[in-house]
Amino acid sequence: MVGHRGRDIRQPWLMLLLVIALGGLLRGLNLGEKALWLDELLTAIFSLGRGIADIPQAEFLSVSAVRSQLSLNPEASCQQIAITLSRESTHPPLFFCWLQHWLRLIAPLNLSLAEQLRSLPALLGILAIPSLYWLNRLAFSRKAGLLAAALIALSPFAVYLSQEARHYTLPLLLISLSLGALVRWGQGQWGDRPLPRGTRPLWVLCHSIGLYSHYFMAIAYIAQIATYLSLSLALKLNLNLNLGSKRPLVANTPSSRAIPLSHLLSLILPGLVFLPWLSHLGQHLQRSETDWFQPFEPSWTDHFAPLLQTLASWVVMWVTLPVEHQPLAIAIPAAVAMVALSLGLGITAWRGGQHLWRSPASRLPLLILILVTLWSLLGFVFIVYGLGKDITIAPRYHFVYYPSLCALVAAALSTYKSPKIPALALMMGGMSSLVVISGLAFEKPYQPRQVAQQLQRSPASTLEVVIGYENSQEIALGLSFALELPPETAVAFLPRDGGYEQTWQQLAQLPGLSASQPSTPLDVDLWIIAPGLREAEYPQQVEREALTCDRRPDDYYRLGIPYQRYHCQPSRV
């Protein structure tokens, strides 16, 4: 009997370790194969302890020389990184500081730049797997915990976030841990379980770190506060929630119905910790880098787009098939299959959730997770329609409530006696993750590798690329293209603060790399990447230091930003 009991105890842990290993394998596959895109290059610049000024501007440099600028600055401190971010970015500093220390640690491994930058987010994404197990184990059962761990391990959305050199998996982990603390807090205050001493300090620590990691952690923070206050108010009003407690939830004296002062202090403490950085948040909201949250050409559809984008983001959390830049014969059936499979999962989870609701012991954690999700969605509504910033435009920002949603779906699936139903959901997620890893879904924005291949259309000509920029994001955009070009390619970043007339004037006086390389042919292909410029606004001809460059109308392209080919030959005297 003892041996049998020992096997029962070990089995969940062995299964959890297997799930973690599988999730780690998925997050590590092809980690450095995809091109670094705009946001990841910003991560590189700041985490390497550098700033935008370290990227040479207003001169032609070879791609190999540009690459040399993206190296670790051994003298940069976390304080310097924070100062640079406050001036040149729209993000809080903690993740970038941690990533810098991580880069120092793994420097002897001689990984590629992409592998170095993505390895820490991947590790944090792996740690989110046991954190979801802990959350659902506390809230419901071991089975629900294992299913939650398996769902996030195989989720195409979670795998995608883990393979981005960005600060999404850190708050994802922190939100998961804080939800576990909130559930335990609620069970101790309103249920019949004792409240462990470290529960509220863990909750405070998670949100204090989180607010300095990503601004959208504020949505999760406020949503969890609102959930706590909502349940406190409901119980104060003597609403019969039947939460399964064996002791009375609402006492007769007014003082016992009040929220303890120590609990209120815990709720507001992360906000107080964040106060020193609050002024930078206000400045960052006004920066031009946030303008992309607003529609380029406003129309009446902008009122409905956030709803559709949110629904699409829910779909790709569970199933992702090749639909981006695919022929209609592939994209349409794939999209229909994604919607159908997601609806099936949603209906299955709804029925399981109803069964879960009928159990008084599960009702309190279920209410907490539902309320956190709903309050988070209300936060999105406020930002989209109140502040005019459509943060639903990118699926990655829905990481804010993904842990609570994942926990709810896993708990609902755990109510089914047949293992086939959760197995189908996990199989669907695993296959979708392979699609993401292969690059057929969640393609890199602006497709730097594909654009770079297009720029190399005339191998017999010298290739020069000019990027007009107005802010740090556009410099990072140009870097993402440049790093995919041959090492000898000449690249120049030219400011466009006063409009593109300034850019054309600078270009005319800009010496090329061929000045120091007499053997370089004078036949030059010049590509001009000009964010914000319309096709008709490209000049028919530009000058380039003793070269006259004629526009090739058939070689104009737009992939989020426009780029135009010019063919340059020696100017006639």
Image (cartoon, grey):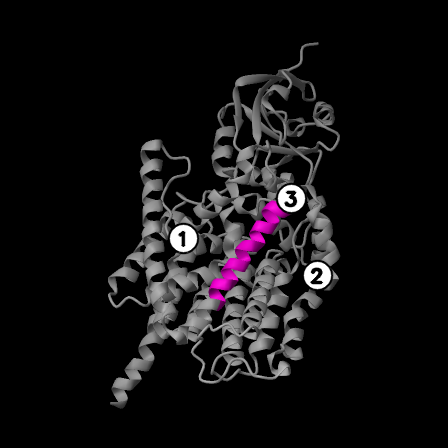
Q: Which quadrant holds the C terminus?
A: top right
- How would you rate the neighbour count of disc 3 (Cα within 10 Å): few for under 14, some for 14-19, many for 20 or more? some
| Circle 3: element type | helix
Q: Amino acid at mark 2?
A: Ser
Dot 1: few (<14), some (14–19), or many (≥20) neighbours within 10 Å? many
* Label drawn at residue 290: 3
Tag 1 near tag 2, CB within 8 Å: no
Q: What residue did someone put label 1 on?
A: 156
Q: Is 518 placed above or below 268 here?
A: above
- The type of residue carrying mark 1 is Pro
Over which residues does the magenta segment extend? Answer: 368-388
Which dot, 2 or 3, sits closer to the camera? 3
> 443 or 255, which lies in front?
255
Residue drawn at x 44%, y 47% as measured from the top left: 311
Secondary structure category for the residue under label 1: helix
Q: Disc 2 marks which residue?
A: 77
